[in-house]
Amino acid sequence: MTLKLTVLWLLFVTTSCATAADYFVAVDGRDSNSGTSIAEPWRTVGRAAQLMQPGDTCWIREGVYRETIKLTRSGQKYKPLTFSRYKEERVIIDGSDPVIGPWVKDETGIWKTNFTSTSPIETVFCGGRMMTEARWPNCSWEENWNAEHKWALTGNDSQLGLIESPELASSNLDLSGGLLYLKLSKGNNCFTRPITGHHAGSKSLQYDKTGIEGRAWNEDSMPERIKKFGFEQNRFFVVAKGALDAAGEWWLDTERSELLFIPPGNGGDPNQLDVTVKSRVAGFEAEDVSDIVIEGIEFRGCNLRLDECRRSVVRNCHFLYPSTPRIFPDGKTALEMQKNLRVTGEDNVLERLLIEWAVDGALEVEGSGNVIENCVVHDSNLHGRHPGPAIGVRGRAERRREAAKNPNVIRRCTVYNVGGVGIYAQGNGPAIAEYNHVFNAGLYCVDISSLYVPVGKEMTGTVVHHNWLHDISGIGFRVDIQGRGITVHHNLAWNVTVGCKLQGFQLAAYNNTVLTHDANGGFIVVFEPDASPEELAGWRVRNNVAHAFLDRLSLRNDSRKSKREFVIPLATVEGAVDHNVIVQAEIQPQLFVDPTGHDFRPEPAGPLAGKGVAVDGLVTANQSSAPSIGALEPNSIPWQAGADWMNDKRPVPKTPAEATVLAKQLRPASIPLIKHDRRYEDQ
Ligand SMILES: [Ca+2]
């Protein structure tokens, strides 16, 4: 063979090898198989991950896989490494391991088995459902949003480090050796602290108050409020061995190396049940790889951690109990312990994910150019820890400066039943939040927004538009602290405590409709006290409709505090603050087609339809005529927000009216919205 021919032959061989290969994995496979045919599958997905080349696909057959698949190899642009379920088969990656048993029942009806663990375990599952660590008051996860079931209230004479509770005494349980979950004062944090003293029949329970004082004082309330109102009527629950008395409860006795369990429902023999213990954080994990596709997989009791990855796609996946943190020492440490479903890097896409029952925040994305689209996230932040968002994005500029211009996008997601914030956008670099549907948020925190930009200073270019935000125990949408260059437009907020709060130097708010539970909470603008006249002139508030437009002072050391009222009506400034309509001045039926039926389209002959002013760069639905005031145009089909599907085959709400009905159905608590104790609030 001549040299030239050899080169050609080598080229041929190389290109042939580079064609995409299919690999197979099955629960009855073996890692010593070839893996290259459906008849000779591997046993583990990890085996495939070690060998795959760009363009290759790993087909996973039906069954439960208990492994953390480490991705160390990258695909290439347009030639990803793909991990997919095979056809429509049901593939589950499970983060828990079976309890071997045998289980033995003691005379009190509690089942026990030997279980050696040097540290506490996070949680126990039975038949794939999360069980409850032995607790008082009794409350299953299904009842989580029923505040009366979930929490007890601290009684008279409670103080920092001591709970006094007659209810506790009458329970006659010995809760020593347990853990306290406590929401103090304003109640935005959930602190977990060891119980240091209690005995059966006692109404007094001592707990380790270390580290609470500073946090509660600084973040949760003003000191003078705590002095004034004390520690009564705060919420708490306890987990302890002595509280093991209800179906579905478990307790790990590390001293005796015993796992104790009362099976759910009407009992049953755990030797015959699928009882497992949380063992792994992640189903897939990767660092610094690119072009991975993960598709059609169910994650149970585990999540996915892609760190510093690029152009990866996670699509059509289902996460049940993705993270189950047990301890909430304080805000900062809780962030490290929560182990959310997390993707960092650039240009990753998370599409059509169902994320259910994350104990703290559900999904966390950091970097730039990442897209979260058409996802449904529900029942997260179960104990109410601020912010604990269902979906959080953090823009990041420092890594690749030019990339920071690419916003992280949250688009057409449906988020509901959240203890704290629904959607949270922070960091350096812009975010786009568009056509999202958030409802039943803020269920266990006081000071929250369903869509929140906490520090707007470095978020120039951020746009929040066309979101449905309703049935919120808090603010509809909020831009906080020194917002600059942020636009909010065509958002529709209803059944919220406060419509919106916008704080900063130069913000633009166009065509928002914000309707509150009562007429006191409206559309609040906070001008930064140190803003220059030019910066103040940079504000635009136009074409909005709300119960009230208010100019509220910034809380932060404003010298004007002594000179004017804290809140005054927002003055009209032609060219900057104009063409806004106050609902109280106009009668609702004249404004909207059917306000009680939640049809917020402008009444064609009323003061909204066609009465707005055109805004540069904004396209309205009704281009032939002048834009209307508010988020909707008359006589047109209203825009819809949220995912184009719902979990559990529920119908997708197509109108605000349908969305309102759905919010009531899906809020399992008997009370309409949680009534917060607002004594400790400072604003
Ligand atoms: Ca119990």
Image (cartoon, rainbow, N blue to C red):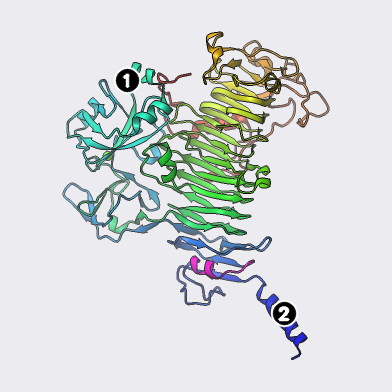
> Which span is picked out in magenta?
46-55
Do the residues under discs 1 and 2 have CB atoms within 8 angstroms? no
Q: Which mark is residue 83?
A: none
Question: Is residue 49 one of those drawn in magenta?
Answer: yes
Query: Is residue 148 among what the camera can see?
Result: no
Question: Is residue 242 one of those drawn in magenta?
Answer: no
Q: Which residue is mark 2?
A: 12
| Direction from residue 120 to residue 579 in the image, left or right | right
Q: Position of residue 274 (x, y in %)?
A: 35, 57
Callout 2, which amino acid? Phe
| Direction from residue 294 to residue 150 in the image, left or right | left
| Direction from residue 157 to residue 35 in the image, left or right | right
Q: Residue at x 36, y 42 (%)?
A: 327
| Magenta stretch secondary structure, dominant | helix
Answer above or below: position of 164 versus 419: above
Q: Secondary structure at mark 1?
A: loop
Instruction: Rate crowding at label 2 as few (under 14), some (14 to 19) or many (20 or more) other CA atoms within 10 Å.
Output: few
Q: Residue at x 53, y 57 (%)?
A: 287
Q: Residue at x 40, y 28 (%)?
A: 187
Image quadrant assignment for residue 595: top right
Q: Which residue is mark 1?
A: 230
Query: Is residue 40 among what the camera can see?
Result: yes
Callout 1, which amino acid? Gly
Q: Earlier in the sequence, mark 1 or mark 2?
A: 2
Q: Between residues 266 and 482, which one lies in front from this camera angle?
A: 482
Confirm if mark 1 falls within 8 A of ligand 1.
no
Q: Secondary structure at mark 2?
A: helix
Quarter of the image with the N terminus is bottom right
Instruction: Rate crowding at label 1 as few (under 14), some (14 to 19) or many (20 or more) other CA atoms within 10 Å.
Output: some
Answer above or below: position of 453 versus 601: below
